[in-house]
Amino acid sequence: MTLKAILFDVDGTLAETERDGHRLAFNRAFEEAGLDWNWSVPLYGELLTVTGGKERMLFYAQNYRSTEPVPSKETIAHLHQQKNKYYQELLEEGNLPLRPGVMRLIQEALDNDLILAIATTTTPANATTLVKTSLNLDWFKLIAAGDIVPKKKPAPDIYDYTLEQLNLRPEECIAVEDSGNGIKSAIAANLKTIITINDYTKHEDFSKGNIVSSDLGEPDRPCEIYTDKYKDFKYIDLNLIQTIMDS
Ligand code: XBP
Ligand code: MG
């Protein structure tokens, strides 16, 4: 089937937004609110099993602070709002660069009239700020994000919604993801997947990914491809993606 669209996850896929973005912003919001919560790099890795910032805070309160009162829904919403404010500032200051190969593949897709869309669990304003500051909003036909669907990844909802809005079938698209929850969501929506791992996700099970690599790579900066049948490729481009679609 000919590829018509590439659907990108945001956090961890377009940029390393978790460790040096969301995590720092959460900690600033906690400090500002007078909470003694502080999420270290390894602790945040444990918390990333829960998608969604509000859901992640609630999970932390219930499981790591179980002797203390659980913050109200309003408190969680306020912390989340502040966290997102600080996170968007970090993006606007240029602190979270795109991962290797992201701009190259997007440019190639645009040159070939492919449709680009975002399918993410993060808050819409976080996703649009990243696209605005590092890419271009006009390049994306759809930004599907956050609470627009009832269930976040690993549920398929956000990808099902994206396909429906674009009026495309899963066989016509490929998803680019970085996490176990992301691949579960994409596969449950019957999509083929490209997985670009990162430090937080490298130990997760990607055996069902169609191609798994260190990143998308660049012609002068090859990526490492872990999927045997594609391991001699130096970077992921449309030619390789079409080969994956045809396999
Ligand atoms: C991203 C997430 C998000 C962000 C925080 O997952 O899990 O929760 O960490 O975003 P994925 P919000 O990359 O699979 O979409 O605080 O805006 O929810
Ligand atoms: Mg992700």
Image (tube, grey):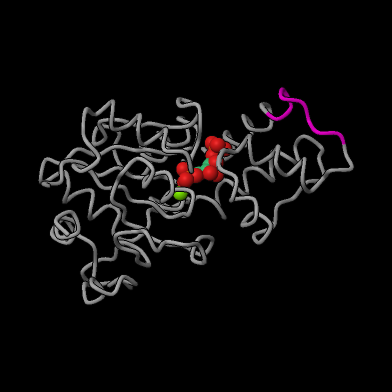
In the rendered structure, the answer to whether residue 98 lies left or right of residue 46 reads left
Q: Is residue 232 above or below residue 242?
A: below
Q: Quadrant of residue 41?
A: bottom right
**Residue 244 picture location, percent across and down:** 19, 59
Identify which residue is drawn at 46% across, 54% down: 179
Q: Which residues are magenta?
A: 69-76
Mark yes or no: residue 210 visible.
yes
Q: Position of residue 147 (x, y in %)?
A: 50, 27
Question: Percent x, y for residue 204?
Answer: 50, 62
Choose between 199 and 242: the one closer to the eye. 242
Please say whether residue 93 is one of the residues in the magenta stretch.
no
Residue 6 at what x, y percent from top left? 25, 44
Q: Residue furthest top?
A: 74
Which residue is rendered at x = 26% and y = 47% of the image? 174
Q: Residue at x 47, y 38 (%)?
A: 155
* Viewer-closest of 244 and 177: 244
- Please determine whether, in this image, residue 118 is positioned above or below residue 18: above
